[in-house]
Amino acid sequence: MPQLGLLHGRVWAALLGQLLRPPRVVCIRAVHSHSQGTRDLSPQQMVVREKILDVIVCCFKRHGAKGLDTPAFELKDMLTEKYGEDSRLIYDLKDQGGELLSLRYDLTVPFARYMAMNKLKKMKRYHVGKVWRRESPTVVQGRYREFCQCDFDIAGHFDPMIPDAECLKIICEILSGLQLGDFLIKVSDRRILDGMFAVCGVPESKFRATCSSIDKLDKISWKDVRHEMVAQKGLAPEVADRIGDYVQCHGGVSLVEQLFQDPRLSQSKQALEGLRDLKLLYEYLTLFGIAEKISFDLSLARGLDYYTGVIYEAVLLQSPAEAEEEPLNVGSVAAGGRYDELVGMFNPKGHKVPCVGLSIGVERIFSIVEQRMKTFGEKIRTTETQVFVATPQKNFLQERLKLIAELWDAGIKAELLYKNNPKLLTQLHYCENMGIPLVVIIGEEELKEGVLKLRSVASREEVAIKRENLVAEIQKRLFES
């Protein structure tokens, strides 16, 4: 498929060519490109996106989630101070003398606001919707300023780690179902991180700032992260070095056991709580048959301020296709964690509702699938039309309209050409180009005999069928195919 940026480049080139010719008209209509960090989706791309969303939403429903939607914008003070350093990426809407509003940054904070506003104590919900972030877009890596998120969250007081384990199982099901290649889910816990910071000598006021530095370890080296923590965040070099001993550790349940025995970390009550929960989580993940997909990784920090417990992030381990495909670095394709205090922030009495959830990175997944299709030259049908109503003769529009109405009323997806007297060859070519499998042909001869011709576009075979049997015959053929 063509890259959208290239497509717009060609459009501009064509327009410039026209503008440089001697003018024949007085007025020229301005043509605008779309905003940076956004994109139009062609019909072919919409088909791919809908298939991806279908896999995701089917999985959410399989796990018993209800659908929910919230407004695209929220009160500005609802969103501020929920995202830490990332708050600067929120899009504020212009003050027009009313409420100060901002576009939503994610689907989690609006969900917490909804729970508190409606005084709900538990809910399992999914939400598919657009969010907006003022970051530097990297279109090649599937990063945009406007993008779609697919969230699943479990809110309510439940026994430890059971909902958390189900969230990780859902990520595994979706990534396996989308056939993106091998993947790994990194897991950590905010309490372990905070305990680690405390025993390493980080002042509590710098916990979140240190977290956001560590969160960059998947993009830049430890040396650069250490420099940022010392030069920009003001940590002592020996404190940064102590942190370095931990954040470069990753492994399975054996690492959890090892850290229980760590002389420094075992002094933190908070860290021990997190380690106990992770040990239990691994028991459940083993029962779900996905423990080998999970890596306990202390470099995982998840920069958002609202996480309070288990956090996780899924990454692809390799390019999903063959060696000739260019590797596509898209970062994480799913992430989430536990946020037990967010609902309480919106409740006047501070009543807490524990929550855990996940978000699937649709745009990044879409980039991978699109790249794969481009590499292998896969063709996509942009419509689902099953039957085309055609005629070889003039003055048959009325009969075609009556016939297509019968097909629509029977629930059959059908089309015709919007012309009084189309040529038969033009109609048949349209079917071949659009991948429509069946053609119903009506003409003078068929009308006299009370029959219709049903033609297979692929084999070009035609059979005469009584008009009253047409719908049943079409349905039978579609079922068999």
Image (spheres, grey):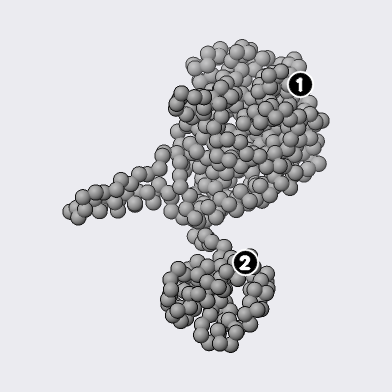
Which residue type does callout 1 highlight?
Answer: Leu
Q: Nearer the viewer, residue 265 or 274?
A: 274
Tell me residue 475's x, y (percent): 66, 71
Circle 1: element type:
helix
Q: Which residue in the protein does label 2 denote?
A: 409
Q: Label 2: few (<14), some or many (≥20) within 10 Å?
A: few
> What residue occupies the far left of the structure in this picture?
22
Tell me residue 110's x, y (percent): 62, 31
Q: Which residue does the image show at 61% across and 17% down from the upper left? A: 207
Answer with left or right where residue 159 lies relative to residue 149.
Answer: right
Residue 231 vs 65, above or below: the answer is: above
Quarter of the image where the C terminus is located: bottom right
Tell me residue 273's x, y (percent): 77, 22
Instruction: Please tell me whether mark 2 or mark 1 is closer to you in this view.
Output: 2
Sequence order check: which comes first, mark 2 or mark 1? 1
Residue 71 vs 339, above or below: the answer is: below
Q: Nearer the viewer, residue 11 or 395?
A: 395
Is residue 109 visible to us here? yes
Mark 2 vs mark 1, CA separation in Å? 65 Å
Answer with left or right where residue 339 lies relative to residue 327.
Answer: right
Answer with left or right where residue 128 lies relative to residue 64.
Answer: left
Checking the image for residue 272, the label placed there is 1
Which residue type does callout 2 highlight?
Answer: Asp
Tell me residue 434's x, y (percent): 50, 66
Circle 2: element type:
helix
Q: Quadrant of residue 383?
A: bottom right
Q: Quadrant of residue 362?
A: top right
Q: Which residue does the image show at 26% across and 49% down from the upper left? A: 28
Residue 349 vs 403, above or below: the answer is: above
